[in-house]
Amino acid sequence: AEVRNFKWEVGYFFWSPDCIENIVMGINGQFPGPTIRAKVGDTINIELTNKLVTEGVVIHWHGITQSGTPWSDGTASITQCVINPDETFVYSFNVNKAGTHFYHGHYGMQRSAGLYGSLIVELEDGKKEPFHYDGEFNLLLSDWWHKSIHELEVGLSSIPFRWVGEPQSLLINGKGQYNCSLAADYSNSSLGTCDLNQAEWQCKPQVLNVIPNKTYRLRIASATSLSSLNLAIGNHKMLVVEADGNYVQPFAVDDMDIYSGESYSVLITTDQNPSMNYWISIGVRGRLPKTPQGLTILNYLPNDASQLPVSPPPITPSWNDFNHSKSFSNKILALQGSPKPPISAARRIFLLNTQNLFNGYIKWSLNNVSLALPSTPYLGSIKYGLKGAYDDKSPPENFDSDYDIMKPPINPNSTQGNGVYTFALSSTVDVILQNANVLSGNVSEIHPWHLHGHDFWVLGYGEGKFNEKIDVEKFNLKNPPLRNTAVIFPYGWTAIRFVADNPGVWAFHCHIEPHLHMGMGVVFAEGVEHVGQIPNDTLRCGLTAKMLTTGQLP
Ligand code: C2O
Ligand code: CU
């Protein structure tokens, strides 16, 4: 195993992600940030300096469990104080499992500003994946707004509410095209053709150069702020083999859905007519799309990359074809021999997802509580038993059994809170995520829920309201997939199970960044008394800062 050291500076700079100049939040002058590649067992040290001048920053390592290093999880107000301008903090953690992951800002809306990059963990030398491939590519997907994140954020926190709206562009590895389309020749839109050769290098699509008759692994991760995506490759089937760093029973598809916070590996075989090139497309699902497809090219060598495919890009399945999405999610099952879930849970928590009002502001709530993060990060305040740092009453574990999820909330008002769900160390926990109607009625949105610090088994998805008597019997305990992100479909529920065996404090939230910002999250904690020495650099704010200056370290 190796120790991999990185020195990063986070800053704003001018960049043209979609050929339109804007400011992005990037790392060492790069957007997206540098790709980290490591091997299982490695230690990663990132010395992060904040060059943002007027804002704090943190980075979360999405998919890494941070076992033994919960203070390196990079969640503002939960595991650490933000890194102030000109300050440096060292994230140090082990990577103990292979997988396709990414990292991103976890403070305010900094992910939307462009603070993300890929984090790929390969198997140890000498170990083999349960599938074969000749080469690999990495596709980090994201969505992009031309407005600043400050304007987007102020809109969310205003009366009247101003929604962020749909993104201007979809980006593949940080590159998209706003003012032109690579596929203009095939569409009847008014967009002109992009000139691949002339395109500014910052927005020039990253072409995938392949050799005929080989097998390639595509690692795909979605760091989108909002968009659920569908990815397809013209003429090529994809064999799904990995989801969120866990092997799945391989299955072939023509197109795949990917929600924010998810990652996959797919295998493709370059067995199509080698004299042609093929489109790789991403399009919006789950919301009425107002954003053009993101495109790049699968370039069969020795063809020229500027040789466009002869047919139009694959058509994205219609945005509201939820059956198509559900059928994809239901195909994802654990590879034989994967760890199985405990057969029962010690505790079952129900989380009703609703849109609400709080003092006239639009919020998202769980069991009528909208998350408002405290000024002292939980990890320190819980470990040192500091009084008054957060609401010490534990939040509601259920909702009114009469609640009609098919209707808008009868009482739209919710409360704000920051209580913690505390689990006995190593106990098994079920969470039933229950979707419902929004304030305006007749809409129930998709929410991809992401858990920090753990993988969980997805025991099942269902329609309507979860019925404990009937639905528990139907849980898949045989081959449920292990994931760290799971979606809830409109008016439906999703059941997950995990073992609370990682001492620390962990966010569990909707991965749509504006939704989290509007309160769509909860906080889990387990075994905090077993957490080792928390670095002082994570404690220099709120009540823990006071504790440090008065020298009253318990
Ligand atoms: Cu990728 Cu808490 O997020
Ligand atoms: Cu959401």
Image (tube, rainbow, N blue to C red):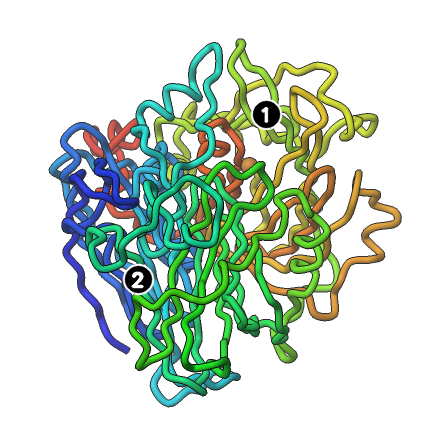
Place residue 12 in its image quadrant: top left
Q: Position of residue 399 (x, y in %)?
A: 73, 29
In the rendered structure, the answer to whether residue 172 lies left or right of residue 525 reads: left
To which residue does mark 2 refer?
A: 206
Write the residue at 53% across / 65% down.
Answer: 243
Q: Position of residue 175 (x, y in %)?
A: 31, 52
**Could you say which is closer to the camera, residue 116 or residue 238?**
238
As measured in the structure, the alpha-carbon distance from the residue carrying label 1 to the one carrying label 2 is 43 Å
For label 1, the crowd category at 10 Å Cα-Cα, with few meaning under 14, some 14 to 19 and many 20 or more, is: many
Q: Position of residue 397 (x, y in %)?
A: 68, 35
To which residue does mark 1 refer?
A: 369
**Could you say which is closer to the camera, residue 25 or residue 524?**
25
**Could you say which is closer to the camera, residue 308 or residue 237?**
308
Write the residue at 56% across / 41% down.
Answer: 422
Is 312 located above or below residue 142 in the figure? Answer: below
Quick one: SS at disc 1? strand
Mark number, residue 394: none
In the rendered structure, the answer to whether residue 105 lies left or right of residue 403 reads: left
Is 529 located above or below residue 387 in the figure? Answer: below
Amino acid at circle 1: Val
Q: Residue furthest bottom?
A: 126
Place residue 456 in its image quadrant: bottom right
On-image quarter of the C terminus: top left
**Could you say which is closer to the camera, residue 318 or residue 553?**
318
